[in-house]
Image (spheres, grey):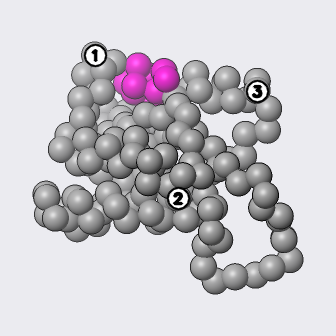
Amino acid sequence: MCTKERQHYFGAILNGELQLSNIGKIVQECLNNLPSKLSYVTLDESVTMPNHVHAIIFINNPKKERMLHERKFQPEKQSLSLVIRNFKSAVTLLVRRNIGVMDIWQPRLYDRIVRDENELDRIRTYIRNNPSRWETDRSSPDNLLM
């Protein structure tokens, strides 16, 4: 999930270490609280970066039958889209109330279904190492003109 216009609302990376801003602390707290607020969610690896968030989220919904032909105009109960909507809403509400920034999120997000253990391990490693790679990241302010 990215910030609006890739603004660095969530903090900074100094010497490969993430230093969270007040907004970043709210983001991290809301992310960590997802499993206690939504009983069907398990949070795996995650990291809050200066202008985006990576998270592996498991949706524990074993009895749910998938009906691909159904078309609805709202998120399904116990779905990733509902989790993300709740997360972004909670962060936005707390940020507006406590800090005054009105709009921090870019619409939409990049999501991916993890298909096997090898892919899961690769993504976990990517997330864990994300702060140490910030200096070479296209989103880093030092690399925007590259």
Q: What element carries label 2?
A: helix
| Residue topped by disc 3 | 117
Q: Which residue bears the numbered disc 2? A: 83
Rendering coords of residue 34 (x, y %):
45, 49
Image vertical order of residue 28 relative to residue 134, above or below: below
Residue 47 location, quadrant: top left
Q: Name the residue under label 1.
A: 15
- Looking at the image, residue 24 lies above or below residue 4: above
Residue drawn at point x = 76 percent, y = 26 percent? 117
What whole-number distance in Å separates the C-alpha atoms at marks 1 and 2? Answer: 33 Å
Proximity of marks 3 and 2: CB atoms separated by less than 8 Å? no
Q: How far apart are marks 3 and 2 (CA)?
A: 23 Å
Query: Where is residue 120 shown, x and y percent of the image?
Result: 69, 29
Amino acid under disc 2: Val
- Above/below status of 67 relative to 19: below
Quadrant of the drawing holding the C terminus: top left
Main SS category, magenta section: helix
Q: What residue type is labelled 1?
A: Asn
Position of residue 118 in the picture relative to residue 132 (left or right)? right
Q: What range is drawn magenta here?
A: 128-137
Q: What element carries label 1?
A: loop
Q: Could you tell me which residue is drawn at 28 percent across and 16 percent down?
A: 15
